[in-house]
Amino acid sequence: MSDGHGHDHGHDHDHGHDHDHDEPVEGALPAAALRTRAIESLLVEKGVLTAEAVARGVDWLVSRTPTNGARIVARAWVDPAYKQRLLADAKVAAGELGIDAAQSVTVVALENTAAVHHLVVCTLCSCYPRALLGPPPAWYKSNAYRSRAVVEPRAVMAEFGTELPAEVEVRVVDSTADIRYIVVPRRPAGTDGWSEEQLAAIVTRDSLVGVVQPVAGEPVAV
Amino acid sequence: MSVEDAVAYMTGTAALPRLNGELVFDAPWESRAFGLAVGLSQAGSFTWDEFRERLIVEIAAWEAAGHPAEEWSYYERWLAALESILEAKGIAGGEEIDALMDAIAATPEH
C-alpha cells in the first residue's frame, strides 16, 4: 500500500479522539512500538519475565549504571567504615547497596587523597568496570587516550580541565581483562550536610575514571 | 564472558548503534526491545550468542532483500530476531503476538 502522498503525518496527540484515522497505522515506527508492547505484555502474562526485568535489562547497560558507581562513592564519603570495606573488596561493597557486580571480574576501588590521584586507562583495549559504570565513553576507547594517559597523564587531565597541584602524585592504573578499577574521588569542599543522594548526583562518570574531580556546585534537589 | 560484556561487545553488523560510545535509541520502544532481549537472556530464556546469531541473520536477510523501501532500522531487525527466537524456543508465537497487537491497537489510549 504505497500511496505515496506527500503530506506529513502531523497528528499531534491533543487527546481529541477523532475517528478519522482508523486505517491501520502506517509507518514502521508505530507498528514496531506496538509490536514491542504486545511482546512484552505477552511475556509478562505468560510469566516469562516481569516488566521490572525489562527495565533492568535496559538500565543495566544504558543509563543508570554510572549512577551505581556514584552511589558507591557517595556512601563511602558519608560512611568511613563502608569506605574501608569498599577499598578492601569493591564487588562485595557494591553488593551491600544492591548493585549486582557478581558477574564482573575483580573490581578494585582506588581512593584519591590530598597526596595521590588515580587515573584509569586500558592501554590494550577498553576494559572498564561496566557493572558499576556502564559502557565506557568513546574517549576512553580512543587510541589517543590509551597511549597518552600513561605517558603524559597531567596533560590528558588538563584537556578535561583538571589541574592538580605539582605535589600530588599521579598514579596511572592499567585495567586488564582480570582487574577493573573505579576511582573514589575526593569529596569536594562545600558539601557538608549534603544527603547521600545529593552527593551521588555530583559524582560524574568521568570522575570515577579519574580524569576530572567532582565539583560541589549547588546541591541538586533529589 | 558475562551477558553484559557479550551484549556490549557485539561487533560487525550486530554492533549496537552508538554515538560517542553511548547507546543510541531513536524511540522509547527501541530501548524497551533492547531490555526485553537482555532481560530474557539474563533470565535464561536463551543465551546471548543465540540471540546475536539471529540478529545477524535478520540483518543479512534485510540486506539480501535489496534494501527495501523502508528506512534501515537496527532495532526493527532486533525485534525480528527477538520474535524469531521466541518462536523457536516455543515461548511465544507470531499469531499470539499479532492478536495481542491488534487488541492493543484497538484499545483507545487514555
Image (tube, coloured by chain):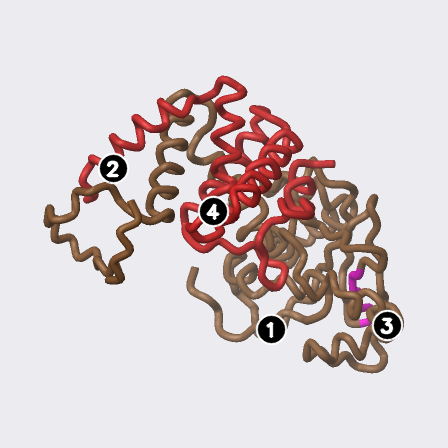
Chain colours: A brown, B red
Disc 2 marks a residue whose amino acid type is Ala
Task: State the CA–CA distance, disc 4 to disc 1.
Answer: 31 Å
* Residue depth check, mark 4 versus mark 1: number of the one nearer the observer: 4
Position of residue A198 measured from the top left corner of the image (x, y, whole percent): 51, 62
Q: How far apart are marks 1 and 3 (CA)?
A: 20 Å
Q: Determine contact: label 3, label 4, CB under 8 Å.
A: no
Q: Mark 1 vs mark 3: tell me if same chain.
A: yes
Q: Mark 1 lies on which chain?
A: A
The quarter of the rendered structure image containing the C terminus of chain A is: bottom left
Q: How far, Cα to Cα, is label 2 from label 4?
A: 20 Å
Q: Can marks 2 and 3 be said to lie on one chain? A: no
Identify the residue shown where x is 69% and y is 47%.
B11
Mark 2, other Cα within 10 Å: few <14 / some 14–19 / many ≥20? some
Q: Mark 3 points at which residue?
A: A169
Q: In which quarter of the image is the N terminus of chain A?
A: top left
Magenta span = A115-121
Query: Is residue A119 a member of the stretch shown in magenta?
Result: yes
Q: Which residue is located at x 24 percent, y 41 percent?
A: A24
What residue is pinned by disc 4? Answer: B31
Which residue is the site of mark 1?
Answer: A215
Q: Report crowding for label 3: few under 14, some 14 to 19, many 20 or more residues within 10 A (C-alpha).
A: some
The vertical placement of A142 against A159, above or below, is above
